[in-house]
Amino acid sequence: MVVSRMIRRRAISVPAVNLAICLCAVCLNAADQQPIRVQICELFHNLRSYDGKLVEIEGAYLADRHGAGLGARCCNRVFLDGHEWMSAFCPVSASAPPPFKRSEVTFTTDDESLKRLWAFYDKVKARDPVSEVFGTFVGEVQLKDSYARPLIMPEAGYAYGPGFCHLGSYPALLVIKEVKAFREIRRVPHQPACPVEPQKFKPYLPFFR
């Protein structure tokens, strides 16, 4: 009787062990996923194709009382559902609960790398508010399925409302896995290299245009 119980227990435990091993393998594969290295403006040019992908990008980091942004001055314009959006991500932590991110991710955020970025950013801005902070970020791009019926900012001409973060004005999230590097760039008066198009409205975020 004792032997039969031991065999029965072993028979039950083997599938459970196998399942646990499989789940661990899936977790490890997700954690070891290599990010796609891409230029940030190229990413915005094909934003939908990167939805749900782990990417590595370099961009300008900006923070104020309304939150943070990660973007670039891109010649290509960002259009979703027929409306133009600024070329900027709203960066969020993997621990942020919905509705601050669209869905859960398979990694955790390296909080120490974020803290180093924040300390460096505060130091740079305290010394020279005009300087910019550029960083190399690894994270998952998250978009919404639909940006139907966005509201329009009359003073800017940019869509806002159904997006992410402050005023719903960001077209996409970057769920941060880590900040790999950052540096200061002394800002010079911006001379646009892109063809100048007549615009009725001023940009919503001149920092990224």
Image: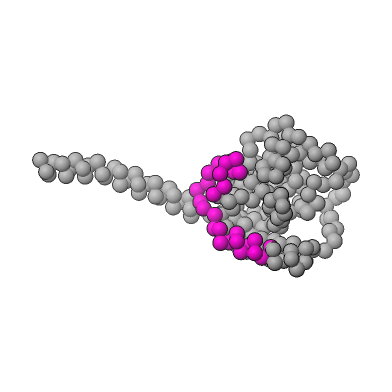
For residue 5, which quarter of the picture? top left
The magenta span reads: 95-121
Color theme of the render: one colour
- For the N terminus, the quadrant is top left
User: Which is more toward the observer, 58 or 113?
Assistant: 113
- How many marks can you see? 0
User: Which is more toward the observer, 45 or 130?
Assistant: 130
Which residue is most to the front?
65
Which residue is most to the left?
1
Q: Which x, y percent locates residue 190?
A: 84, 58
User: Which is more toward the observer, 185 or 81?
Assistant: 185
Which residue shows up at 56% across the image and 58% down it?
111
Say whether residue 183 is magenta: no
Which residue is most to the bottom?
127
Q: Which x, y percent locates residue 117?
A: 64, 62
Can residue 209 be seen in this snapshot?
no
Say whether residue 99 is magenta: yes
Which residue shows up at 59% across the image and 55% down it?
138
The vertical placement of 113 against 45, above or below, is below
Q: Which x, y percent locates residue 97?
A: 56, 44
